[in-house]
Image (cartoon, rainbow, N blue to C red):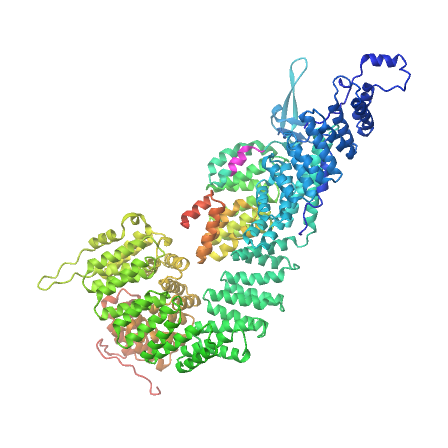
Amino acid sequence: MRSSPFSSLDLGHWSLVLSVAAAALALPATAHAQRYLLKDGTVLQAADVTLGSGAFVQQVALPGGGSFERRYPIGDVVRLDFPEPEALEEAQKLVVAGKGPEALALIEPVYRQFAPFARVQGSHWPRAAQLRLEALLLGVDAVTITSAARELMQSGLGPEVTGVAKLALAQLDARGGRESLANIMLEEIVREAPPAIQARAWLLRGDLAAARASHGEALEHYLRIPAFYGTIDELMPAALLGAARAYRGYGDNGRAERSALELIDTYPDTLQAATARREFKL
Amino acid sequence: MTLPRRPSGPSRRFRLPVALVALAMAGVSLPAQIPQIPLPNLLAEVEQHLSARKPGDAVGLLDEVIKRAQGGEALPPGINLERLMLTAANANFQSQQYPRAAELGEAIEKLPSVGATALAEARMIRGLSLALQQKYAEAIPVFKAAEESPTFRDKALLYGAMSANQAGQIPVAIETYNRLLATSTRDRDWADAALSLVDLHLRAGNVPDARRGLALLRGKLDLVDNLAGLNLLSLQLGDALMKGGDNAGALAAFRNISPRDVLISEQKARIAGLERALERFKALTRPSATESDAIRRLNARLEQAKSSLAQVEQITGFDATLRYRLAYTFQERGGVWEAALLYEDLIANFPESTERENAYFGLVRAYADAGRFDRVRDSVERFTRAFPQSKFGPQALYLAALAAGQRNDLEGQLTFLGLATEKYGAANELTEAMSLMRANALFTLARYAEAKDIVVNYARQFPQGQFIEEARYLSAMADLAEGRASESEKQVRDYLRDYPEGRFVPDGRYRLAAAAYAKQDFKGCIELCDKWLADYPPEQPQRGELHSLRADALAGLGRIEEAIVAYHEALNLPLSDEQLGYVLDELTRHYQSRREYDAAVAMWEQFAAERPDHPFVINAAYWISRIRNREGKFDEAIDLVSSIIRRYVTDPSRGDVERLLVEIANTLGRPPRVKRGEPKPEPIPEQTLFARVDQLLLAGEARRSPTAQARALFTHAEIAAIRKNDALRDQLLGQIASRFAPDQLPPGILGKVGDTLLAQGQPELARKFYEEILTTHPKAVFADFAYVGLGEIALLEGNGDEALARFNAAIDVAGARFKLKEATLGRARAQILLGRMDAARQLLEEVASNRAWRGEATAEALFLLGEIALRRGTPDDLARAQAHYQRVYLSYKRFPAWVARAYLRSAETFDRLGQTQEAVTTLNRFFTFRELERYPEWQQAVALKPRLEARLPAGAVTDPDAPLTVSLPTSS
């Protein structure tokens, strides 16, 4: 464990050197095309086709004038080669800032654009759909949230996406005061979901315990985030704020303040830091 | 970078002159000497070899061309020597003829005039050729020189750094990487270089720089293909930081490491991505030079990533190791809850881990440091089951006991010490320390006899033990506390004889002086004090205590003026809060007895001015107010008290402000004094007083403070209470409950509001206010309000155990400063609920016999004593029950609820004794009190009466005024 992970790698670097004198060194910047790759190897530039009913339509010009339509079934698309839409990055920031409607306005077009290719490699639909669900969760429309969650669960996009959907349903149960139902779902998530989703489930468990004024239990849930999921930075502010409140409820004001200070120092621009400043008068 | 081109087809530069070709084709013979192949022909052949990617075949021809050109032969137009030599250097390099390539590179550099581009290319070829001959040290300055070229700068820096690394010149390598990373584009090459730099920093022991580098990379994870390498470096960095005692830094490093499965999965995904990219390039039939380079780079990166992944996969117990490191560093920087979670996980999920025993030890410590002593007990049990012979077992329990002691949980401390003896026997390396700790805990719990036994045993067992001095002194103090003053004095004297330089000598001498005072040998006490004060320096911490004792002795001799001076000397020295309070109170008492009110007030005013933030400032205000009120200087008292209140009125944590609010309410709410010869003045209307309160308390910013507003309302409620307007009082307290969140209220108000809500039948709402006291102000003097209130709620819920624990805590934890009566009565009620009648009876008798508590508590206690006796049901007990009920309705008519119950029970008891006539008479007497009609017992009595009358002999008369006596069977 103490040996350098690079001691054996230098040869690799030097083998790289061999090419230097013979070739140009800089990799060209990858210009992202927007294209569809079909199972027969055909590459369709997005700009050259329109999406029709179940198929792409390409206008092919004839040498002597005139044109004809060539159709490519959507089911033949095996990969999308599209850059990630900037709207998703922006929407993510808005979701973190608690601005649900603004985030939704950015997400919806992307969500619809990629919906026909939900499960195709390179599709941005899974991320858009998850962000959409997160943005919806900032509101109170339980029916739409449930529908969005079910859609993700049925998408067959893997445990992470299913986990996000289950978590949303657990959140709805928790909001509706159905804690035991929420707990059943959360139990499944912490057993089966990928770590990032597990961490969010622990956060929700912390919130549920805190609402019951079970401060010790809440602490054990919130503090799982820094203890076991230290690489998931985006959940840390909520975990630290929850822990600070739970410490205070537990009667450990010293640790409560320390947790609040860690939140304010490490994540100064978050909503949670602002809340901590106000609540703990820091 | 523009490198020498390898022409792929006929090149204009190397095209042979047409005349020469024609000559050759016509078979014209050359001059008689051995003919030389013309340079253009040679160059054409060179071009053919290079085009055929056979640079090795071209190098000899190129050497010949160069030689002839250097010999003065003219080169074809468009070709110069510089270009020729560069092509030769390149061809030699490609055919791995590194010495010759380096030689040519150097020769180009020495040409009298050489273009900047060619010079840079020559340097790169030379540097690389040297490096590939492992002449790293020689390559370094060559790359350094190549940095001058803007085209080659980044590559020269990269290879320069790599050469320096290989040459063992780590500082040079680091410096070069730093210059590269400072300006290069943030791409995957940058990430590779940054990882190498972090590695170098770690190897060079530059931990802070390594830390910064890793943090930078963490922010650009999408560029890092070698995630496994990054995680391994984080692990190494964490270890280095931990070794250097920087646990916070180590924790930050460890927290960035992914669990093994996640890491392997992510690394494999990135490797697959690299492989896919490689496949795409390889599919190209004729990759361009750029694409060929990209392929080589991808291969190298792939190799790195695979190697690091293999390293991760080879580390056994990666996750357990990571857990332990995380737990340890969390624990060392106070994150004991997180540490406990991690240790628990390690113990549960990694049964083969070598860190398990350490994890158990850490777990016990973590629970102890968090004050979670129930978990400590459980973890100790598990630890001893899993590792019965662990040398860490006693240590863990010792630390747990220490932690409990630091939290003043002395019972917990004793439990852990007991467990240590039970689990690991009396003989271990910590036995001595634990014995003394146990004795100290028992002493502090006032279990002096047990403490004494332990230290006596200790002295017997370890006559030369490391704590023998402490043991002997503790023995003396235990005797003193047990009232064996002369025995204690003897031991103190022996101690002073045997340990003239001992730790406790100053205290021992103080104790001897105190012993003299206790024996009323005031002169002896003063002598001892004077000698003590002469022998020890001014900074000796007990000096204030000695002055105080000397003052007590002077007062004992009636030398009050001197005593006052001595108390003031004590005041000028460090004193514990308890001693400070004692000295201030003694001075106040002496001043009052001498009617020197101004001196007393001046003393408190000076105290408040010198120590404005001391908790006793409230005492100062309280005393000044009382003294001024006694003098009739009400306005002066109010002004002073309100000025002190205003300092803290917005701060809910200053719970003692409520004492002053009550004082203000008392001063304002009292009836105006009647002046001789004048009619009794009308009391000032409450609303006028409330406005005055607002004016006094809600000045400036305080007007907007919820806490201050609540305090003003609380003072209104107190005035209403003084005016005996209970409805208004409850209404005002109700307003506080509805307008303010519990966390805005100080503990005293929380308690009062909680009580009001509970009395109004809103236990759930009341619970919030009580719980706020315990969570936010657990040490407040009003904490007993919370314990008693929560005890009452537990009683309402039928939870006897919890109720009893709450009432006990009101007395044992909070000291029951305000609620001793309620807590005692509550304990009795809880004991009844739990069916422990004897315990309940003792407590009720305590309540009933306490003259200071005479009132409704007495009525309830008597009634409950009746209930206990009634439940037993023997004739004697029934007679006793009857006596209790009669005492209630005869002596406590002010409490109609109890009177109604007592009448009904009395009638029922008569009935059970067979005295139906007396039972009916009792009911008739009950019915004469129409004001009791609103109680449920009234209706029950109405229903009972005809049933009783039916059993009376015909014509029997029941006179409500007839005397009632209990007829006992002869046997009793």
Determine the main secondary structure of the stretch shown in magenta: helix
Q: Nearer the viewer, residue B179 or A4?
A: B179
Q: Residue lying farthest left?
A: B677
Name the side, left or right, on which A109 lies relative to B489: right
Whether residue B733 appears in magenta in the rendering, the answer is no
Could you say which quadrant of the image residue B659 lies in? bottom left
Q: Residue B123, relative to residue B966: is it above or below?
A: above
Query: Where residue B310 sits: x, y (%)?
Result: 70, 47
Query: Where residue B856 sits: x, y (%)?
Result: 29, 69
Q: Residue B519, relative to residue A53: is it above or below?
A: below
Q: Nearer the viewer, residue B10 or B31?
A: B31
Query: Where residue A149 sits: x, y (%)?
Result: 54, 42
Name the side, left or right, on which B91 lies relative to B516: right
Instruction: Report the number of discs.
Output: 0
Query: Where residue B865 sits: x, y (%)?
Result: 34, 75
Write the start and end of the magenta stretch as one range.
Answer: A84-92
